[in-house]
Image (cartoon, grey):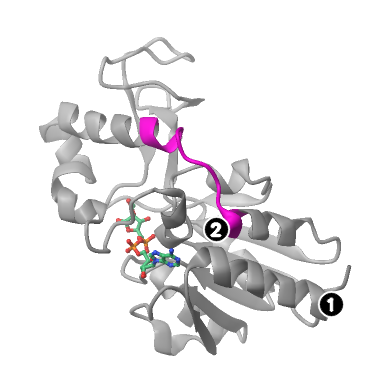
Amino acid sequence: MGDMGNNRNIVILTGAGVSAESGIDTFRDGGGLWEQHRVEDVATPEAFQRDPDLVLRFYDMRREAVQTKEPNAAHHALARLEREPDGDVLIVTQNVDDLHERAGAKNVLYMHGELLNAWCTACDARSRWTGTLIDRPTCPACGAPALRPDIVWFGEMPYRMEEIYGALRRADLFVSIGTSGAVYPAAGFVRDAREMGVETLELNLERSEGSSWFHETRLGPATEIVPAWVDELVDAG
Ligand code: OAD
């Protein structure tokens, strides 16, 4: 096992493309979630105020679906990279599924929240949640029927930004996997990383919107190009 060449501290940003081959719909590809639902109807605080049943049902369906899916070779390869003794790997995910964790990754930061969490708007507690919210269950911590999906909606601030920028500042390599680069602040990480002098690599099915910012881009399905990249890194160490 090597020291991963010169790239010891690695920050990996993942998006829907890393879970696509597990059978979880992406947002912006043909047939993606945002073709089936308007963002403003299901993924904003205003939508939740206006039509809570619609929003709760949307996330209940996704929560149920994700529990029938399995991590794929890309999730497993990233978990393997994390286990390398000499490297410091942080996975920053925009995904709200738990597939990185189920593949064995430990260092996962959910910047857009987690489908398998419920967040109490009365007492602020977060609870592991595998069932439905449409039936207005009570919060396990305070008993109020005030649970919402623990999902960062449009117009809300992504989680743990300070930690993410701190990790980028310490990074030698920033890798973006399976994300279209359409949603900020995540889409801006590559530029931030470059300004900090960090090497940048994109792994995606097709060029993302910010593709030209990366030092290197490799195109292909995540289940092929992610394990290949991890093998390369581990062998080079
Ligand atoms: P998108 O649906 O915008 O982009 C998915 C990207 O993955 C695209 O660039 C695809 O080309 C690529 N892709 C698809 N299949 C792939 C495969 N098998 N292997 C590799 N790449 C593949 O999803 P995100 O960029 O993750 O936010 O979207 C970012 C955010 O927008 C989401 O977190 C969500 C959404 O609105 C919130 O809900 C807050």
Which quadrant of the render holds ligand 1?
bottom left
Left or right of residue 158, residue 30 in this image: left
Q: Are marks 2 and 1 in contact (CB under 8 Å)?
A: no
| Magenta stretch, residue numbers | 64-75
Q: Position of residue 158 (x, y in %)?
A: 41, 53
Identify which residue, 165 or 220, lies in the foreground. 220
Q: Which mark is residue 237?
A: 1
Q: Position of residue 147 (x, y in %)?
A: 34, 23
Q: Is residue 58 above or below residue 209?
A: above
Q: Can see residue 129? A: yes
As for residue 41 lying within the magenta part, the answer is: no
Q: Is residue 196 above or below residue 74?
A: below
Residue type marked 1 = Gly
Residue type marked 2 = Val
Q: Can see residue 165? A: no
Residue furthest top as drawn = 143
Q: Quadrant of the N terminus?
A: bottom right
Q: Quadrant of the C terminus?
A: bottom right
Q: Which mark is residue 75?
A: none
As for residue 74 lying within the magenta part, the answer is: yes
Measuring 55% from the left and 52% from the top, which residue is drawn there? 72
- Count numbered badges in the picture: 2
Determine which residue is flagged by label 2: 92
Tag 2: Cα neighbours inside 10 Å, few (<14), some, or many (≥20)?
Answer: many
At mark 1, the secondary structure is: loop
Identify which residue, 31 or 37, lies in the foreground. 31
Q: Is residue 153 above or below residue 146?
A: below
Measuring 14% from the left and 44% from the top, which residue is drawn there? 41
Q: Quadrant of residue 15?
A: bottom left
Q: Earlier in the sequence, mark 2 or mark 1?
A: 2
At mark 2, the secondary structure is: strand
Measuring 12% from the left and 31% from the top, which residue is drawn there? 51
